[in-house]
Image: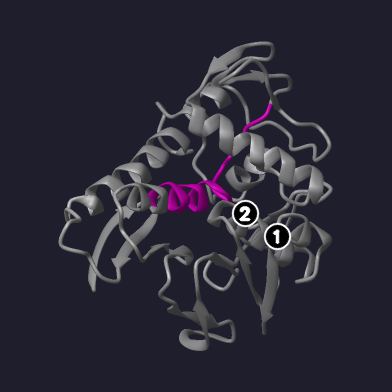
């Protein structure tokens, strides 16, 4: 077994390869990390040169050319938003800025008002996003999972038979070897609450135990219920297994916001949920 880790996407990304056959170049780690680094560069809310920052700086009516990966993630995010009646919503970035979970973008514009039913962008021509209302987007609830999927795909292209890519709790396992995954106890996050064996699928976990805080007499977290713009303050954690880590990553937010591990959207995307209290 070989393991490498690098800091990306605001967390530590760890790649574990169960066994590297003699014909596989160990530089396959570099190929996988390069995919994660690309997502970091394209979809960072913090980087003023990212696709997301350029979209957020755009004026209403402007079209912004974006990378195919960014286009794909936004397209999937919008589909999940429809399937969840807006609970998962990438347009809620103004709330996260207001609550100081995200920095104010490099723009002279005032923080826009978040209106749950009013998207700020649509996808226009191929690999273009058009600003249709003043607002900001953030892909923090789905991009990490997408990066994991790209890393797994890179390893598979190079012939790696079995691996696990874990980006801060958003992970995916490929191959015929199962990986035991520990999930924190929500009541005591420094302890393991449960261990799940993951085999050839993705698993993501979300919780608020590290992000909850009080501001101006109100309690907030880094998770937003996109349907009503309120911070999620649940005491449990939500884990979702899905074919793709991108889906698992996004759908954990739906389970956290609703408290329903059987939300219909999960079955629609071939996923299943688990709540730990």
Residue at 60% of width from left, 70% of height from top?
207
Residue 109's quadrant in the figure?
A: top right
Mark 1, residue position:
270
Is 212 placed above or below 96 here?
below
In the figure, residue 167 lies in which quadrant? bottom left
Place of residue 78 in the rendered image (x, y in percent of width and height, measured from the top left): 71, 38
Instruction: Say left or right for 268 vs 153.
Output: right
Q: Are marks 1 and 2 in contact (CB under 8 Å)?
A: yes
Q: Which tag is nearer the camera, tag 1 or tag 2?
A: 1
Which quarter of the rendered picture does the C terminus lie within?
Answer: bottom right
The magenta segment is 135-151
| Residue 203 position in % (x across, y down) | 55, 67
Q: Which mark is residue 247?
A: 2
Q: Name the foreground residue: 15 vs 8.
A: 15
**Neighbours of disc 2 within 10 Å: few (<14), some (14-19), many (20+):** many
- Please state if 261 lies on the left or on the right of 167 as rendered: right
Q: Position of residue 235 (x, y in %)?
A: 67, 77
For label 1, the SS is loop
């Amino acid at each position: 077994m070989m393991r490498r880790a690098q800091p990306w996407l605001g967390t530590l990304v760890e790649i574990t390869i169960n066994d590297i056959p003699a014909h596989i170049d160990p530089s396959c780690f570099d190929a996988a990390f390069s995919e994660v680094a690309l997502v970091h560069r394209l979809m960072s809310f913090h980087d003023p040169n990212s696709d997301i920052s350029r979209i957020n700086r755009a004026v209403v009516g402007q079209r912004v050319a974006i990378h195919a990966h960014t286009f794909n993630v936004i397209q999937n995010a919008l589909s999940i938003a429809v399937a969840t009646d807006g609970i998962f919503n990438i347009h809620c970035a103004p709330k996260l800025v207001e609550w100081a979970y995200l920095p104010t973008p490099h723009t002279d514009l005032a923080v826009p008002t978040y209106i749950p039913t009013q998207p700020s962008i649509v996808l226009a021509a191929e690999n273009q996003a058009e600003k249709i209302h003043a607002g900001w987007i953030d892909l923090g609830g789905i991009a990490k999972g997408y990066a994991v999927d790209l890393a797994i795909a890179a390893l598979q292209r190079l012939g790696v038979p079995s691996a696990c890519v874990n980006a801060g709790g958003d992970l995916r396992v490929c191959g015929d070897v199962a990986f035991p995954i520990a999930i924190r106890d929500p009541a005591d996050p420094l302890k393991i609450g449960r261990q799940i064996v993951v085999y050839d699928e993705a698993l993501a976990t979300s919780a608020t135990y590290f992000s909850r805080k009080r501001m101006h007499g109100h309690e907030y977290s880094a998770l937003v219920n996109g349907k009503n713009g309120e911070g999620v303050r649940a005491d449990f954690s939500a884990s979702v297994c899905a074919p793709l880590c991108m889906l698992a990553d996004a759908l954990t937010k739906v389970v956290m916001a609703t408290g329903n591990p059987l939300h219909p959207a999960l079955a629609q995307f071939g996923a299943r949920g688990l709540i730990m209290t």
